[in-house]
Amino acid sequence: MSANPQPVTVTIFDKDYIVGCTEEERESLMKAVTYLNRKMQELRDKGKVIGTERIAVMSALNITHEFLEYKRSNEEFASVVGSGIERIQAKISHALTRGQQLKSTDLTEHT
């Protein structure tokens, strides 16, 4: 597969754009184009935003907001999972230490 970006024509809101994209990124690019088109069409269809440039900016703002909320949510989730893992590691460490102490006690009693 090619690591060099190749020109790809994408259509966003009925206008063509040429974008440099590697073969590996092409599917992701097309999904992004589809998502952006859908968001822009939703804004246009609601009729509250008029003008292609304003629709593009408001769509970008909405998508950025969605991304930041998603990122914040994942950071909170990662923090909760991290805390849970730390508690489990502490319990395992405690159990191993206790097991070693019991083993040492058994060895000293049998000698």
Image (cartoon, rainbow, N blue to C red):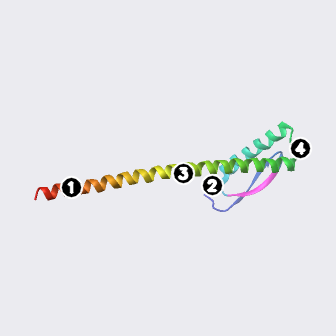
- Quarter occupied by the C terminus: bottom left
Identify which amino acid the numbered label 1 is placed on.
Lys
C-alpha separation, residue under disc 2 versus residue under disc 1: 55 Å
Q: Quadrant of residue 18?
A: bottom right
SS for callout 3 = helix
Identify which amino acid the numbered label 3 is placed on.
Ala
Q: Quadrant of residue 19?
A: bottom right
Q: Earlier in the sequence, mark 1 or mark 3?
A: 3
Q: Nearer the viewer, mark 1 or mark 3?
A: 1
Residues shaded magenta = 16-21
C-alpha separation, residue under disc 2 versus residue under disc 4: 36 Å
In this figure, which residue is indicated by the disc labeled 1?
103
Is residue 32 left or right of 13 when viewed as pictured?
Answer: left
Majority secondary structure of magenta residues: strand
Q: Residues within 10 Å of mark 3 (few under 14, many from 20)?
A: few
Nearer the observer, 59 or 77: 77
In this figure, which residue is indicated by the disc labeled 4?
50
Nearer the observer, 55 or 29: 55
SS for callout 4 = loop
